[in-house]
Image (tube, helix red, strand yellow):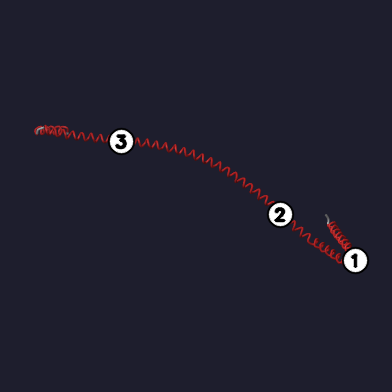
Amino acid sequence: MTITRRWMRIVGLNALVLLMAGSALASEADGHGGGLLKDFLYRVLDFGVTFGALYFLLRGPFKRALGARRQRVVDELEQARQMQASAERQFAAVQKQLADADAQIARLSAELQGESAMQCRRIEEQAQKLTAEIRAEAARSAEREIAEARKQLHQEAVRLAMQLAEQRLQQQLAPEDQARLIDEYLRKAGESK
């Protein structure tokens, strides 16, 4: 719409208001209120001129202010849409991570149970090996102890037998037999050198 058309509409609208107001006053006063009509017409003309001047002066700033406000609203709405889309993406990512976390927890739990079972088997095997080694060592130790005890018993038996034989010999041998045996021993010992 061009500026001249706008002005024509404004002027036409003002004229229509003046005509309607004038006819209303004329019909009310039956033509006797000429002073009132004149005053009313001045007021309507003053209102029209003031309204037109305000419209002309404030139209640009008002239009710019409304345009700027509209642009801010549009920008804020776009920013809100972007923030909403970003929040929805983040929410979806978090949901996915939560779903993945549940799967990871289940997988880790299964792995830990498997490892735990393997550890138990290894520990049991090691315990069995250790038990076998301890038993074998205990058997060897017992055999050594028994062998040592037998050796000591044998030595004790030999010692006791020698003491017994010595006592019997001393009882059965006379002093001459003892002297003869000592001489024989010394002679044999001298020959062997």
Residue 101 percent across, percent down from the top left: 56, 43
Q: Residues within 10 Å of mark 3 (few under 14, many from 20)?
A: few
Whether tag 3 and tag 2 are in contact, CB under 8 A, the answer is no
Q: Nearer the viewer, residue 118 or 191?
A: 118
Q: Residues within 10 Å of mark 1 (few under 14, many from 20)?
A: few
Point out residue 185 in the picture as x, y percentages from the top left corner.
Answer: 14, 33
Disc 2: which residue = 73
Question: For the residues carrying marks 3 and 2, which lies nearer the camera in this image?
Answer: 2
Q: Nearer the viewer, mark 2 or mark 1?
A: 1
Report the residue marked by disc 1: 32
Q: Secondary structure at mark 1?
A: loop
CA gap, disc 3 and disc 2? 98 Å
| Towards the viewer: 146 or 50 | 50
In depth, the one of 103 and 37 nearer the eye is 37
Residue annotated with mark 3: 142
Q: Nearer the viewer, mark 3 or mark 1?
A: 1
* Of callouts 2 and 1, the N-terminal one: 1
- Disc 2/disc 1 C-alpha distance (Å): 56 Å
Earlier-in-chain disc, 3 versus 2? 2
Dot 3 falls on a residue whose secondary structure is helix
